[in-house]
């Protein structure tokens, strides 16, 4: 088996695997190990354990000094919230003072949807690639402009879903923040909804003078789609998408914010659900997973933004906040 094949197989493992050299720097990692550290594999390479996962430094140093395999029931990777997780650890000394590190997956809990979602993201890679290829062929062969536009829409959605899968696999490291016009993802969502025969009617109330936002536009599309589809499934027939500068809001780091309001004419969120609406597995529908809002809020917070349910005299009103891209005074 050649090295590229070995790397590809190791990237499919749920077990995090890495090699640290004699200076306690990472010289090789698989995707699961990088995800545990909240980074991409490339950003892990050459990094010191003392900085990336200080909880691993002492057992790795001891394994090298004693030159023997070690199995530890649970090691906390580090002091930050992202690394404050205890994982089973296996260490194996290698040649040239290197140490093989294996981090076993944490046992899934009822409140943690990520293990199942990451497995799903792995399984969807190949079908999405096939769908994208078929859409490209249709786009080239379609005789009518409208057909080519629909094929392009399918192709672009395959790309967006593939990017969402990578974010689930890699964590926050896959989030790409750039300056963008918030009206672009809104128009994208409007086009996607228009392609559905029974979707709610969408109206816009835009502030055309808005400055650019800072964030991941693809994740904003996903959050808006989740909200729109939730409204539709709750019985809403009208959806208003409104943009404004949020004059009184301040986000992390004191940044000013802009807001996107998603207001529907449905029955609204039941009072019994409002306090727990963004928790995993909480849904107002018998067939709902309760994950859409959880993932949407998590994605927006990774970008420095937020998502909340706001008071409304009718229907449901959700407010997305994103930091402005303009320099702060």
Image (tube, grey):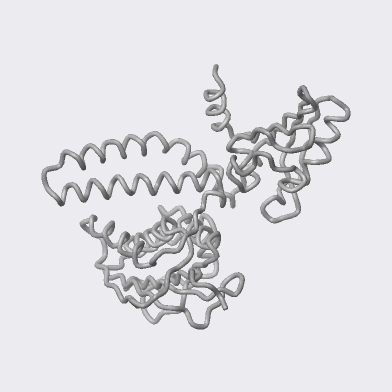
Q: Is 51 rendered above or below residue 207?
A: above
Q: In which quadrant of the rendered view does residue 211 lie?
A: bottom left
Task: Tell which of 157 and 114 is nearer to you.
Answer: 157
Q: In which quadrant of the rendered view does residue 204 lie?
A: bottom left
Task: Tell which of 320 and 100 is nearer to you.
Answer: 100
Which quadrant is home to the C terminus?
bottom right
Q: Where is residue 19 in the image (x, y as percent from the top left)?
A: 70, 31
Q: Position of residue 31 (x, y in %)?
A: 58, 37
**Left or right relative to 100: residue 166:** left
| Residue ranking furthest to the top | 1
Q: Is 309 rendered above or below residue 192?
A: below
**Left or right relative to 273: residue 187:** left
| Residue ranking furthest to the left | 143
Q: Where is residue 226 in the image (x, y as percent from the top left)?
A: 40, 59
Which quadrant is home to the N terminus?
top right
Q: Is 287 rendered above or below residue 136?
A: below
Write the residue at 53% across / 78% down: 249
Q: Position of residue 89 (x, y in %)?
A: 74, 35
């Amino acid at each position: 088996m050649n090295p590229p094949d070995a790397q590809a197989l190791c990237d499919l493992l749920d077990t995090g695997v890495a090699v640290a050299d004699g200076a306690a720097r990472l010289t090789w990692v698989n995707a699961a190990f990088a995800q545990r550290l909240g980074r991409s594999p490339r950003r892990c390479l050459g990094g010191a354990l003392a900085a990336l996962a200080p909880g691993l430094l002492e057992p790795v140093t001891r394994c090298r000094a004693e030159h023997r395999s070690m199995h530890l029931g649970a090691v906390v990777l580090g002091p930050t919230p992202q690394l404050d997780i205890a994982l089973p650890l296996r260490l194996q000394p290698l040649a040239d003072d290197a140490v093989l590190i294996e981090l076993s997956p944490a046992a899934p809990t009822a409140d943690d949807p990520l293990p199942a979602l990451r497995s799903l993201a792995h399984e969807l890679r190949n079908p999405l690639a096939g769908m994208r290829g078929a859409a490209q062929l249709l786009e080239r062969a379609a005789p009518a402009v409208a057909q080519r536009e629909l094929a392009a829409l399918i192709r672009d959605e395959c790309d967006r879903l593939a990017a969402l899968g990578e974010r689930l696999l890699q964590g926050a490291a896959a989030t790409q923040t750039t300056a963008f016009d918030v009206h672009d993802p809104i128009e994208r969502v409007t086009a996607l909804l228009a392609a559905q025969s029974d979707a709610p009617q969408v109206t816009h109330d835009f502030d055309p003078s808005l400055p650019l936002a800072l964030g991941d536009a693809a994740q904003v599309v996903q959050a808006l789609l989740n909200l729109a589809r939730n409204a539709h499934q709750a019985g809403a027939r009208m959806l208003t998408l409104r943009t404004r500068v949020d004059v009184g809001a301040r986000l992390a780091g004191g940044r000013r914010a802009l807001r996107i309001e998603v207001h529907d004419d449905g029955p609204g969120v039941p009072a019994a659900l409002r306090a727990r609406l963004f928790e995993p597995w909480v849904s107002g529908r018998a067939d709902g997973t309760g994950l859409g809002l959880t993932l949407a809020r998590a994605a927006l917070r990774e970008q420095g933004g937020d998502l909340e349910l706001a008071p409304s005299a009718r229907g449901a009103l959700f407010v997305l906040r994103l930091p402005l891209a303009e320099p702060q005074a």
